[in-house]
Image (cartoon, rainbow, N blue to C red):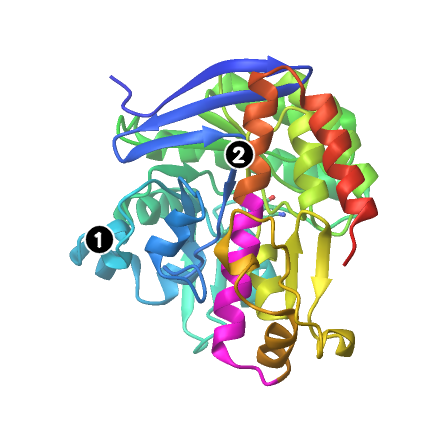
């Protein structure tokens, strides 16, 4: 009996409100998933990540297989125990990070061999090994191994990578061996070509997965291309399975993804932007490196439900950022993650109330009019 299940509870246009139930807790969708690449959401205690409203966070096969090693994490009780996060974890399969980080990569039908970007040691990642690593980590939602290519790309290249990813999807499903305590997602590829995307979606559904990720986006294409691909492909995915848009994105990307039927999102942007002095508020993003803030005693947003948006002056946050004090990264990471969770929580409520169109218009108007 599958112990991880998805329930769709409301729709409004293409937007969906749902819930994934797992043995480690529920995931309310649309969901934003903070990225904890190497077993930590940078500059945040796990309790703080939960307090922002996150139901689930991400780990990464590539980083964890290099350091500290999947077998070592398993011997220490699995990733949840290792990092003191007892709620759900989703892990990526590692192929995307190999292609973007590793050295001396060699991709064949069997998988990908590479040298660690840390110490140059040699590794091989196959669909089977990726499933084994994610199982050793005891992840609750795991990904097939896939090949993601940057855009723009020649159609033949997009077709080759998409067809390889379907063959790897089949091997991933076999290696998964119908585990009941976690979900396995297939990953739709096909670049910006509608016919290739349709073939990928159909091929994955003939294999059968617990959920469907939309990969191959947020790889250099304009937002309108990403939105077109989403509008075309989400109606071709099963309505009763979760849809996860990988690596996306900024708040306006997420709002547009929700409007086009996406249930799950992840991105390093909120925490990375926080470490670089950018604060996300309901008025939009504020660059606290800018000298105009150095005498500004106002808080970021005195009406915010987040105490961190009320208790610090912009002048002080500017000072922390300019002096590269660790507290700056801590405060702004929390502010940004809390904003992303507030955005998705308000979207869930809007879908339940049948007012997604109004919510999206109000949110975009606030971004446009914001007094930054
Ligand atoms: C921890 C990071 C998760 S998302 C990484 C990611 C990001 C983006 N943008 C695309 C892809 C993709 O096509 N496939 C895979 N496996 N991962 C992708």
Which is nearer the eye, 33 or 66? Answer: 33
Residue 316 lies in what quarter of the image?
Answer: bottom right
Asked whether residue 327 is drawn in magenta, I would say yes
Disc 1 versus disc 2: nearer the observer: 2
Determine whether 371 is above or below 158 in the image.
below
| Residue displayed at 73% across by 24% down | 358
From the image, tell me which residue sits under label 2.
345
The mark that comes first in sequence, 1 or 2, is 1
Residue 245 visible from this viewpoint: no
Q: Is residue 328 left or right of residue 39?
A: right
Secondary structure mainly formed by the magenta segment: helix
Q: Which residue is mark 1?
A: 81
Q: Which mark is residue 6?
A: none
Q: Is mark 1 within 8 Å of ligand 1?
A: no
For mark 2, does the 10 Å Cα neighbourhood hold few (<14), some (14 to 19), or many (20 or more) residues? Answer: some
Residue 5 at x, y percent in the picture? 36, 21
Q: Secondary structure at mark 2?
A: helix
Residue at image x 71%, y 78%? 295
Q: Is residue 14 above or below residue 244?
A: above
Point out the stretch of residues depicted in magenta: 323-340
Find the distance from the CA under tag 1 to the CA under tag 2: 27 Å
Q: Report the residue at 24% width, 17% height from top.
A: 1
């Amino acid at each position: 009996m599958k112990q991880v299940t998805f329930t769709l509870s409301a729709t409004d246009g293409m937007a969906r409100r749902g819930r994934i139930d797992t043995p480690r807790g529920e995931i309310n969708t649309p969901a934003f998933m903070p990225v904890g690449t190497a077993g930590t959401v940078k500059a945040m205690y796990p309790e703080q990540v939960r307090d922002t409203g996150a139901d689930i966070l991400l780990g990464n096969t590539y980083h964890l297989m290099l350091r500290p090693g999947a077998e070592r994490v398993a011997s220490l009780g699995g990733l949840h125990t290792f990092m003191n996060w007892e709620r759900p974890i989703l892990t990526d399969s590692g192929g995307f990070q190999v292609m973007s980080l590793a050295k001396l990569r060699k991709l064949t039908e069997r998988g990908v061999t590479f040298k660690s970007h840390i110490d140059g040691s040699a590794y091989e990642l196959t669909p089977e090994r990726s499933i084994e690593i994610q199982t050793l980590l005891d992840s609750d939602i795991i990904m097939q191994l896939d090949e993601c290519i940057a855009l723009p790309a020649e159609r033949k290249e997009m077709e080759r990578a998409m067809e390889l990813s379907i063959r790897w999807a089949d091997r991933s499903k076999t290696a998964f061996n119908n585990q009941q305590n976690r979900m396995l997602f297939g990953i739709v590829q096909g670049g910006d070509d509608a016919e290739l995307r349709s073939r990928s979606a159909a091929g994955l559904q003939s294999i059968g997965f617990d959920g469907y990720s939309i990969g191959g986006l947020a790889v250099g294409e304009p937002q309108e291309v990403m939105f077109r691909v989403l509008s075309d492909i989400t109606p071709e995915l099963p309505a009763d399975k979760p849809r996860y848009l990988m690596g996306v994105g900024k708040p306006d990307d997420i709002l547009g993804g929700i409007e086009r039927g996406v249930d799950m999102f992840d991105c390093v942007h909120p925490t990375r932007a926080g470490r670089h002095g950018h604060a996300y508020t309901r008025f939009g993003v504020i660059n606290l490196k800018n000298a105009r803030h150095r005498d500004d005693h106002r808080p970021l947003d005195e009406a915010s439900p987040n105490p961190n948006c009320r208790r610090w002056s912009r002048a002080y946050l500017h000072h922390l950022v300019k002096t590269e004090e660790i507290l700056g990264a801590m405060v702004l990471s929390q502010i940004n993650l809390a904003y992303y969770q507030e955005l998705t929580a308000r979207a869930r409520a809007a879908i339940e109330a049948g007012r997604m169109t109004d919510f999206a218009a109000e949110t975009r108007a606030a971004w446009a009019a914001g007094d930054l």
